[in-house]
Amino acid sequence: MKDLLSYYQPNKVFISFDMDILSDDVNSLSTTTGSNNLNRHRKQLELLVAKIIELDEDDDDRSRNIDIFLIPLLIHGESVDGSNKHDELIEDYLYINYQIARDYSVFYIELFYDFSKYLEKNNIDNLSHSVLTVNGRILNDLGHIYTCLLLLKAFRITDHSLVGENLAINEERRVFKIKEELSNLNRYYQTTMEYAVE
């Protein structure tokens, strides 16, 4: 790691893991196994952060201080009815990242709750995937765009083309129009059925 930091000389380091950090086969991950792996990962993440801080403090170039960002990007299922298998495990993992960021005075960027809010608004059919992900875990095009928007927002960057176009917002508008059309169809269907009964 010392060689990497010396070669690239970054002033920012971003640390982000997904659910694969907890198991080779996330789908078969149990709560007990997940909790054990969480404890192990906590130690590893803590050591990683501490090591970067230590190497930065030992650096001869005192003008260069490395900002460390913990950005846990976790999504495992897009259902909005509480049926995602690993939501509780994700909450625990997020809290570990938050605690380490607090204890070591590094930056912590939370994306999970923004994802959840987006899905609550836009996952009208309570799908397990296909809104922001391909399969419930791997981000699709919109998922990547939305992640970028959240990161740009976190860094207060307002002059990027993504922010201007705001494709995720446009997608929200598209879904809202679909909801309106479905609502109109539903009203039409109910009215038609009332006339049929009469």
Image (spheres, rainbow, N blue to C red):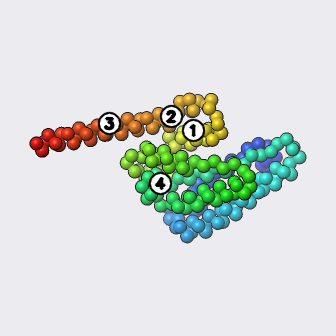
Asked if the residues shown at circle 2 and circle 4 are in contact, with their CB atoms under 8 angstroms apart, the answer is no
Q: Position of residue 49 (x, y in %)?
A: 74, 55
Q: What residue is disc 2 on?
A: 167
Q: Residues within 10 Å of mark 4 (few under 14, many from 20)?
A: many
Type of residue at label 1?
Answer: Leu
Question: Considering depth in this image, is 165 or 27 the residue closer to the camera?
Answer: 165
Q: Which residue is mark 1?
A: 149
Per the image, the residue denoted by label 3 is 181
The residue sitting at 61% across, 38% down in the picture is: 152
Mark positioned earlier in the residue sequence (4 or 3): 4
**Looking at the picture, how far across and down is residue 59, in whole percent?**
86, 48
Q: Earlier in the sequence, mark 4 or mark 1?
A: 4
Q: Mark 1 near mark 2, Cβ–Cβ under 8 Å?
A: yes
For the residues labelled 2 and 4, the Cα–Cα distance comes to 22 Å
In whole angstroms, how far apart are the C-alphas of marks 1 and 3? 28 Å
**Dot 2 crowding, Cα within 10 Å, few <14, some 14–19, many 20+:** some
Q: CA distance from mark 1 to mark 2?
A: 9 Å
Give the left or right position of residue 30, taking residue 47 as reference: left
- In-front residue for pair 47/28: 47
